[in-house]
Image (cartoon, rainbow, N blue to C red):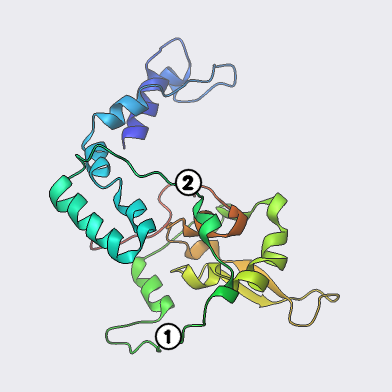
Amino acid sequence: MIAAETVHETLTGNEKFSVANTGEISPDEPVMELSDFEDKMKSSWVYDELREVRNCHASFHMGFLPGLVYSGLATHIFKGKEPWTFRHTVLDSEMTKEASNYSPIDYPQPDGILTFDLLTNLQRSGVYHEDDQPAHLQIKPEFSHVPKGVSMQKYAGPEQRFCPAGVYEYVPSEEKDSDDGQKDLVINAQNCVHCKCCSIKMPQQYIQWTVPEGGGGPQYQVM
């Protein structure tokens, strides 16, 4: 909301530009910088809330229990007043390890009472995207080799495991000259609930996540 307000004020603040009068941006108009956005954010309640918990996520780099203890102290005692800020020194995508370092987990089947299958939960999110809009999830051209020869082969396809909406799935390749067992990645962008995990955690960050058309995405009715 702060970003939208800043954009509106910037575009309509100078009447010599047509956008202030007609609502249409002329290609002849200069690029405008939203220089007030940072100041507006820092003076808002959003900034205060985020600053209080700025160290919680990073504290788990010390381990689960130390992170849990620190997060409890930060949220209930320190309340963001600690004079230090933990810094991330490594990209999240670089923290994703190869499947050979782990043992497969045999998850129990959902019982339909306390636990439910993925598509049932997805339906409850009310997710919706216009059918004719461009997919907002795409493979970066320079990293097209990752889903073909890296993600499944070395990492056991983590994108199809952590995605809460079944956006990513590997299906048998239809290419005639493909090797036996070769699989292709299918992206069901219409299912996306906008968690952005895929653009952050995948090896080499090969997913290009862009903002979909306004109004698209999950429509949670009880939030």
Q: Which residue is mark 1?
A: 107
- The structure residue drawn at horizontal position 59% and vertical position 21%, both measured from the top left corner, is 27
- The structure residue drawn at horizontal position 49% and vertical position 54%, both measured from the top left corner, is 92
Circle on res. 56 = none
Pick whichever, 159 or 11, lies toward us.
159
Look at the numbered disc 2 and give the secondary structure of its residue.
Answer: loop
Q: Residues within 10 Å of mark 2 (few under 14, many from 20)?
A: few
Q: Which residue is mark 2?
A: 89
Q: Work out which residue is located at the far right of the displayed protein and give it.
A: 177
| Kind of residue at disc 2 | Thr
Pick whichever, 32 or 179, lies toward us.
179
Q: Residues within 10 Å of mark 1 (few under 14, many from 20)?
A: few
Q: CA distance from mark 2 to mark 1?
A: 33 Å
Q: Earlier in the sequence, mark 2 or mark 1?
A: 2
- The structure residue drawn at horizontal position 54% and vertical position 67%, both measured from the top left corner, is 159
Q: How far across and down, in percent of the image, does residue 54 sit?
A: 30, 45
Q: How far across and down, in percent of the image, does residue 200 sit?
A: 50, 54
Pick whichever, 20 or 148, lies toward us.
148
Q: Quadrant of the N terminus?
A: top left
| Kind of residue at disc 1 | Tyr
Question: Can the viewer see residue 206?
Answer: no
Left or right of residue 223: residue 119: right
Pick whichever, 159 or 55, lies toward us.
55
